Image: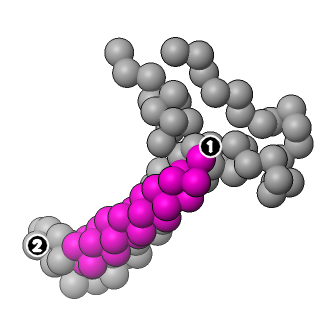
Amino acid sequence: MRDLYRLDVELFAGSQGTFQLGFYLLALLSVALHLFSGWHKAVKKMDATKEQEPAFTKLGHALIWPLVAGFAVGPLYVWAAQRPELGVFPESWQIMKPEL
């Protein structure tokens, strides 16, 4: 079983962590835009009436952003919690690196 928390802590640590986080968020944004535009095309291929299409499109678009935000919160927290100089979190929330 993989320890995804440890992987996040190691990936977003140090000076490379900022670069890694930026790359991750940029990739996540590209996935979000792909889902956003692709959902509209998928709704067109569904067996929905013309009156239903806008509702299905809005529903899909509304569900994309919470999904993307959920994938962004973990890495953002791990990155910010490892940087006490930012003062984002109280000291009790600071991340200790897991022992190998």
Rendered location of residue 65, percent (x, y):
48, 65
Q: Nearer the viewer, mark 2 or mark 1?
A: 1
The residue at which mark 1 appears reads as 78
Asked if 23 appears above or below 40 in the picture, the reply is above
Residue 12 seen in the figure? yes
Magenta residues span 14-40
Image: 39 above or below 80: below
Position of residue 30 in the picture relative to residue 76 (left or right): left
Q: Which residue is mark 2?
A: 45
- Tally of numbered tags: 2
Amino acid under label 2?
Answer: Lys
Q: Earlier in the sequence, mark 2 or mark 1?
A: 2
Residue 5: within the magenta? no
The residue under the point 44% across, 23% down is 3
Q: Position of residue 88 (x, y in %)?
A: 82, 54
Q: Is residue 72 left or right of residue 60?
A: right
Between residues 69 and 20, which one lies in front from this camera angle? 20
Q: Quadrant of the N terminus?
A: top left
Q: Residues within 10 Å of mark 2 (few under 14, many from 20)?
A: few
Please give the name of the residue rendered at 64% of the width and 27% of the height, measured from the top-left corner: 97
Q: Position of residue 12 (x, y in %)?
A: 54, 46
As drawn, 10 above or below 48: above
Report helix, strand or loop for mark 1. helix
The quadrant in which residue 43 appears is bottom left
Q: Residue at x 72, y 44 (%)?
A: 81
Q: Quadrant of residue 57?
A: bottom left
The span from disc 2 to disc 1 (Cα, nearest Å) is 40 Å
Instruction: Residue 70 in the image: state x and y as whole percent.
Output: 52, 51
Amino acid marked by disc 1: Val
